Amino acid sequence: MKRAAALAGVLAALLGAPATVAAQCPRTSLGDIEDEVMCPVCGTPLGLATDAPQADRERAYIERLIADCRSKDEIKAALAAQFGDAVLALPGDAGDDDLGDVLVYVIPAVGIALAAAGIAFAVVRWRGTRGPREPGGGDAPAAERRLEADMERYEL
Amino acid sequence: MRRVLAPVPIAVICAILALVGLLAYGLAANEPDRKAEESLARGERASAPPLRLPRLSGLGTKSLEDYRGKVVVLNFWASWCKPCREESPLLDRWHERMKSRGGTVLGVDTLDIVGDARDFISEYELGYPMLRDKDGETRESFGIVGFPETFVIDRRGHIAAVRRGPVDDTFMRSQVAPLLRERS
């Protein structure tokens, strides 16, 4: 009876082992990774390379690594070992050019800010110089107020 | 004095000109290198660009310079490339023919997964030497835009023929066989 119980225990442990491994497996997916890596031949992020044979091979490789319980970082490192750092789509993933990784974000932001400021300045200047002003430099609301005061004075 | 153009139209014109300039630069920068074909069209053979890469086996590196004095059929391929499957057995047959006459096929597996490349070589029982260009660094110097592409290099290290696409027996007979008769 004790032997049967021990055997049942061993069997239960063996059957439960894959479930334990699966539970410990880092959870990542192909969709999660393919936005962060490139298809090196296509020159686009892997997620956008729908019809390229090289992209299909890369996806198959990623799926094999996911099935092997590799984490997202491990898979990206494995891809970099196969294709070089250029396969990593996100700045900072290569980890060897800190200044470059910061500039990738800063330069476009500064460019957009300067362009917006330039356009705003040009629009203000343009509106300021456009169309004749009222005689005496008066603006429309002031003239309206004067007209209303005159109308009240003459009780029209 | 009358203003010729208001600032906003000037800004818009400048932005359009900048975009057109950027587009032109992008097109010019992506133009593949075709020096080898241009030289061949003039009846000249350009020097092959330098090439030093690790072996696909992982054991050491090899350069084109190491093959000086031999006729080299330099073939850029990848395991995911379908036309490469068609030409590889032909290249292997030609490698066997060329070996005793001072020639070799030299494969460069490019932008490929090592395991897939090794499976490909086993499947087709390829016996010629193989190098590995993991990040495609040689694509620019050889002006490679697709796979496969093949460069026939004479005994002095000059490019004697180029095929952008799979080679066939006619190409090998007309472009490679005569070079094997040339002396270095």
Image (tube, coloured by chain):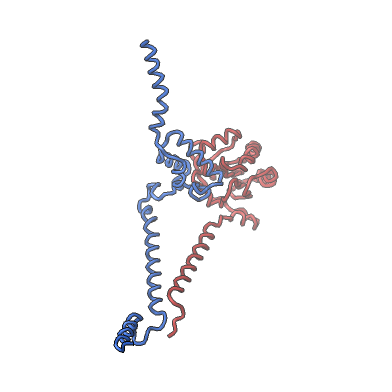
Chain colours: A blue, B red
At horizontal 59% and vertical 44% (from top left) the residue drawn is: B75
The N terminus of chain A appears in which quarter of the rendering? top left
Q: Quadrant of residue A133?
A: bottom left
Q: Residue A150, position in %: x, y?
A: 31, 87
Q: Is residue B19 above or below residue B134?
A: below
Q: Nearer the viewer, residue A125 or B144?
A: A125
Q: Residue A19, position in %: x, y?
A: 41, 28
At horizontal 42% and vertical 39% (from top left) the residue drawn is: A28
Question: Can the viewer see residue B66?
Answer: no
Q: Residue B53, position in %: x, y?
A: 50, 43
In the figure, is residue A61 to the left or right of A139?
right
Q: Nearer the viewer, residue A83 or A93?
A: A93
Q: Is residue A129 above or below residue B169?
A: below
Q: Residue A89, position in %: x, y?
A: 44, 49
The C terminus of chain A appears in which quarter of the rendering? bottom left
At horizontal 46% and vertical 73% (from top left) the residue drawn is: B9
Q: Residue furthest front?
A: A155
